[in-house]
Image (spheres, grey):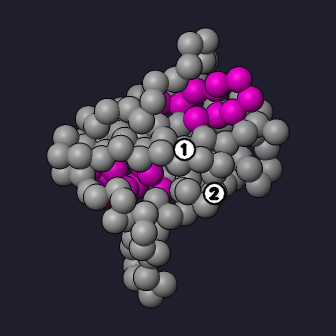
Amino acid sequence: MADHPTPPLAGSSVLLETRFDAATVTALRHRVAACAADAGLRGERLDDFVLAVYELLTNAVRHGGGHGGLRLWRDGTSLACEVADRGTGFDVAARAERLPVPAAPGGWGLFLAGRLTDRIDVASGPDGTTVRVSSGLT
C-alpha cells in the first residue's frame, strides 16, 4: 500500500483497524459511525465525517483493486481516518487543481471528503494510494 501521509502521534488511541472489500463496505461504514460517535463526534460533524470515509472506501474499491485497509484513531481533540489501497495511483497535484464535472456520475469522492472534513492528506504512487481525513471533536 502507499506510504502513510504521516504516522499517528504517539499516544493516539486506535479505535478501528481492518481490511475491507466491496462486500464489507456498508457494514464498515456503520462501524466507523459507531466508533466516531463513541469518540465524541456529534450531529452534522459526525454525518459529514462518516460520509467522507464512505467516499474513501468506495474509491478504494472502485479504483484501488477492489479492497483496502482502514485505520481510525483519536488523536487528542481530533478524529482521523486513513484508507489505503493498492491501486495504480494518480497524480495528486493534477487532481487537486481540477473540480469535478457537475454532470459526471463520478469523480466527487476526494473532493467531497476534503469539503466534509477539516483536513485531507493524500499520498499516491504506483504501489497504491493512502488518504487521511481528520475532523476536530469540538
Name the amino acid type tagged 2.
Answer: Leu
Q: Establish if 77 lies above or below 92.
A: above
Residue 32 position, x and y percent, is 57, 38
> On the image, which quarter does residue 69 sit in?
top left
Measured in 3D between alpha carbons, the distance from the residue under mark 1 to the one under mark 2, in whole angstroms, is 9 Å
Q: Which mark is residue 133?
A: 1
Q: Are marks 1 and 2 in contact (CB under 8 Å)?
A: yes
Residue 54 position, x and y percent, is 50, 52
Q: Secondary structure at mark 1?
A: strand
116 on left or right of 43: left
First reached walking from the N terminus: tag 1 or tag 2:
2
Q: Does the magenta segment cover residue 60?
A: yes
Whether residue 109 is visible, yes or no, is: no
Whether residue 94 is visible, yes or no, is: yes
Q: Quadrant of the N terminus?
A: top left
Name the residue rendered at 52%, 23% in the picture.
8
103 on left or right of 137: left
Name the residue rendered at 50%, 64% in the picture.
111
Name the amino acid type tagged 1.
Answer: Val
Q: Residue furthest top?
A: 11
Name the residue rendered at 54%, 63% in the picture.
112
**Residue at the spot of label 2:** 116
Other-residue count near label 1 (Cα within 10 Å), few / some / many at <14 / 14–19 / ≥20: many
